Amino acid sequence: MINRFMKVMVFFDLPVSIKEKRKQYSQFRKNLIKSGFIMVQFSVYARTVRNNDDAKKYSKIVKSILPPSGSVRLLIITDRQYDSMEILIGEKYAEENYLDKRDIIEL
């Protein structure tokens, strides 16, 4: 079987200078977590998906929860590309282990 697992990564920089903006930031982050994304670094979240169709599905979900201002980027990469990432300082968060393809239940 060909490994087609992928990662959907979301990078964001949102304003938090006023109470309303902090609330929008918090709501966006909570919605990412509710959608199964896990923090890789501050303002960088990722989710493992089974294939390109799932990646498109989660891309649409992220687009539907966008805050009205700030900077949000989305990147879809293969598991192999993600696994080749070098950690130069620090280490993986324990939660990153949940991004492992072995945790996805195939139907």
Image (cartoon, helix red, strand yellow):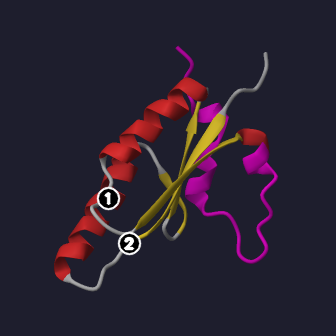
Q: Secondary structure at mark 2?
A: loop
The answer to whether residue 1 is above or below residue 31 is: above
Residue 66's x, y, as percent? 33, 54
> The N terminus is located in which quarter?
top right
Mark number, residue 58: none
On the rendered structure, is 20 left or right of 65?
left
Residue 77's x, y, as percent? 68, 43
Residue drawn where x is 59% and y is 34% of the image: 103
Q: Secondary structure at mark 1?
A: helix
Q: Quadrant of residue 64?
A: top left
Task: Answer whether residue 94 is magenta in the image.
Answer: yes
Report the front residue among 39 and 75.
75
Which residue has dot 1 on it?
A: 28
Residue 68's x, y, as percent? 27, 62
Residue 38's x, y, as percent? 49, 53
- Please tell me whether mark 1 or mark 2 is closer to you in this view: 2
The answer to whether residue 22 is above or below residue 95 is: below
Which range of residues does the magenta coloring cover?
A: 81-107
Amino acid under disc 1: Phe
Q: Looking at the image, is mark 1 or mark 2 earlier in the sequence?
A: 2
Which residue has dot 2 on it?
A: 14
Residue drawn where x is 51% and y is 71% of the image: 42
On the rendered structure, is 94 left or right of 36?
right
Residue drawn where x is 37% and y is 69% of the image: 70
Q: Residues within 10 Å of mark 2 (few under 14, many from 20)?
A: some
The answer to whether residue 1 is above or below residue 76 is: above
Amino acid under disc 2: Leu
CB within 8 Å, label 1 to label 2: yes
The answer to whether residue 70 is above or below residue 74 is: below
